[in-house]
Amino acid sequence: MLSGYTEAPERAQPISPDGAVPARAATDAERAVRSPAEAREAVESVARAAKAQAGAGGVLQVVHGARRVGWAAYELQRSATELVQGVAKPPYAATGSLDSLEARKLAEGVEYQVLYDRSALARSPQLELTSRLVALGEQARVVHAAPTKMIVVDGEVALLPLTASEQTVESAVVIRSSAMLVAVTRIFEDLWRFAAPFTCEREHLAGDDQPSEEERWILSLLASGATDDTIGRLMGFSARTAHRRVRELVARLGVETRFQAGMQAVKLGWL
């Protein structure tokens, strides 16, 4: 679900092809990424290189304005023939047209691999929408804190934000076949490897299976990334008790990690 770039497309100039980016512009970001923190640093390196190239009259195409960025996101996905990879996170605006486009492309056999920032799934409408798209064939995973939004289409072109407000992406850069595109793709692949799987099955638990108010607080803290020490301090437990309670909740939810427990609790409507 890559609708988070901006509003539905209206009249705007189409994207024109550009040349390659000099290899040295992406040297730092192109290294292998081993953790989400390193992924964030690599994204920032790519963004700095993009701004430098654009400001120097380089070969990258910069798109200014929320509507034009939305048009770019739409056109790039519309042109996909094999694979769309993306990271979805706020800011969001109107989403209907891009969601419908993804559904059509999935029906055409285009593969979608989408990473969701945890905050993107915090709202019930988004969770329902993602579940529907997963049911249609989208491959979705969740990361605790994605470094940026992005779209990569067929391994040939990417769209990466340059500037954004709390409400929308104000400018973005289109990156075509180049060393910089290789770096962006590698960042996505490393984030994908670290991410937790998203599944669209919803289980409805009732009666004794519902969590207590205390357990809801613990799960809420888990979903926010709190450590056992932090949970214990906020809940008035010892660290050992907090660890035991967390372990019990993880086992009860049938997941493997603390983060997955928080996400599963959201999906079950416990939070």
Image (cartoon, rainbow, N blue to C red):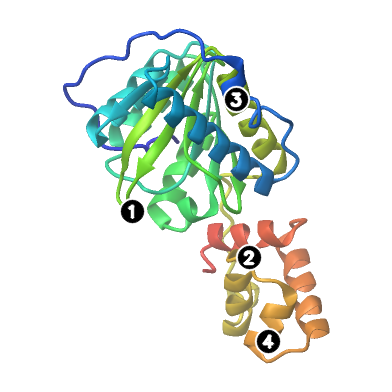
- The quadrant of the picture occupied by the N terminus is top left
CA distance separating discs 3 and 1: 28 Å
- Mark 4 or mark 2: name the one nearer the start of the chain: 2
Can you identify the residue that label 4 sits on? 233
Q: Are marks 3 and 1 in contact (CB under 8 Å)?
A: no
- Residue drawn at 56 percent across, 20 percent down: 181
Residue located 63% across and 79% down the image: 215
Q: Earlier in the sequence, mark 3 or mark 4?
A: 3
Q: Which mark is residue 26?
A: 3
Amino acid type of the residue tagged 3 in the rendering: Ala
Tell me the crowding category of disc 3: few under 14, some 14 to 19, or many 20 or more residues within 10 angstroms, Cα based: many
Report if the CB atoms under discs 1 and 4 are less than 8 Å apart.
no
Label 3, secondary structure: give it.
helix
Select label 3 or label 1 by which is in front: 3
Mark 2 or mark 3, earlier in chain: 3
Q: Nearer the viewer, mark 3 or mark 4?
A: 3
Quick check: marks 4 and 2 in contact, CB under 8 Å?
Answer: no
Q: Nearer the viewer, mark 1 or mark 4?
A: 1
> On the image, numbered disc 1 is attached to which residue?
166
Disc 1 from disc 4: Cα separation: 32 Å
Question: Which numbered disc flags the more N-terminal residue, 1 or 4?
Answer: 1
Asked which secondary structure carries label 1, the reply is loop
- Amino acid type of the residue tagged 1 in the rendering: Glu
The residue closer to the viewer here, 122 or 40, is: 40
Q: Amino acid at mark 2?
A: Gly
From the viewer's perspective, is the residue at label 1 or at label 2 nearer? 1
Q: Where is residue 253? Give x, y as percent.
A: 70, 62
**On residue 225, which mark appears?**
2
User: Residue lying furthest front in this view?
Assistant: 56
Q: Name the image quarter holding residue 111.
A: top right
Location of residue 137 in the rendering, given as x and y in whole percent from the top left corner: 54, 29
As drawn, 9 above or below 244: above
